[in-house]
Amino acid sequence: MLNVELLADRVARTSLPKRGNKETERQERVFNDKVRSNGVDKEALDMQVKEKKKQEDAAKEEQRAWDAEMLHNSKVACLLHSRQVKEKRVIEKDIVNYHHQYQKPWCQREYDLNDPDHWRKTEEGEAQLMMSPDLVGEDPESRSRLQRQREQLREWLIQQQTERAVETHQQRLEKQRNDQIRVDMDNKALQLQNMEMERRRAAAVATKECNLAMTEEKRCKDKDYRADMMNHQMTGVDAKPSLGMVGLCASSDRRRHPESLQQIIQIQKYQIEEKKRIELEKKKEEEQHDRVRLDSARTALLIERQQARLNKQLRRHQDSTNIKLAESQRQQKPDIERGCIDDSFFSRFNSSSR
């Protein structure tokens, strides 16, 4: 059977890829957000863009108006400032001209207002004679009084320096005395410690000598006993103690008797008790020395705190006194400078015997 292809089939076969390509292009065009126009309100978007531009333009215009107003206010302020400076300068110039024109020196109170030109007619010598030696408010003794005040202030300062030096010297002496007391206490404690060590050393030497003597005695007795035993063995004599046996003397038996062993035990017990007693006394003395040292240290600390407290009180009192003196001098200084001093000012000085 022959394969016969119709024209319609051929056209359909060629048009199929074209339709697929068109569909792909259409999908790309529809699903691309930047290119597609389907499903978008373009007029609304254009209105939004126009509204945004209008808002930006309005903000720029408002900022421009604010800048222009600020520049205008700055110019107005500069003009007002320059006008005030000019007016102030003119007023000062007018005041100076007024002083030169209407307030001349010979029109002042010190001159004769009825005859202003009288100072031109009088000579210099006559003018000096006409001047009154005692004017109102003048103090002829001001220089001498100021000199006396300076001398008195100098004496006060010297007195304060002397008192401070004496106080410092007393504090130094008291500190040296406290140091000397502390050194003496330390030396005494060291001396007591040395005496205790010497006593312990002597007791140890005596105990050692006693033990050596007892050891030597015991060794001698053991040696004699062994020698007697060897002699008896060599002579063939029985070493058993027997009162009726010939050749054995009762006095030649050198074995230790129970009485001597009991005495040795008692002596050893006595030595142990003596050693315990010495250790107990040593411990008590050490505790006593520790208590003495603690008490001395506590006393020294209390003395130092008391001295510091006294120094602080003295310093506070001195500061308050200096503040009062400075305040009184500050109150008197303006009166002294102006020359307005009455009799109550002089009554403040020489009020005591110092």
Image (cartoon, helix red, strand yellow):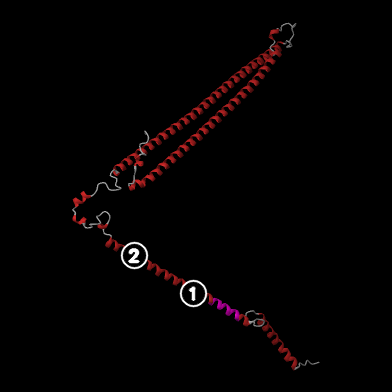
Cα gap from disc 1 to disc 2, whole angstroms: 39 Å
- Residue at 72 percent across and 87 percent down: it is 16
Q: Main secondary structure of the magenta part?
A: helix
Amino acid carrying label 1: it is Ala
Residue 267 location, quadrant: top right
- Residue closer to the observer: 329 or 214: 329
Q: Is residue 180 above or below residue 19?
A: above
Image quarter where the N terminus lies is bottom right
- Residue closer to the observer: 211 or 184: 184
Pointer 1 and pointer 2: residues touching (CB < 8 Å)? no
> Is residue 47 covered in magenta?
yes
Q: Is residue 247 left or right of residue 181?
A: right
User: Which residues fall within the magenta stretch?
Assistant: 46-57
Amino acid carrying label 2: it is Ile
Q: Compare marks 1 and 2 and give the one earlier in the sequence.
A: 1
Find residue 38 and report its horizontal and vertical position in percent. Answer: 66, 83
Find residue 81 and report its horizontal and vertical position in percent. Answer: 39, 67
Residue 31 location, quadrant: bottom right
Find residue 112 and report its horizontal and vertical position in percent. Answer: 24, 55
Residue 65 is tagged as: 1
The furthest residue to the right: 1
- Residue closer to the observer: 104 or 354: 104
Find residue 215 and report its horizontal and vertical position in percent. Answer: 63, 18
Residue 91 is tagged as: 2
Q: Is residue 241 above or below residue 87?
A: above
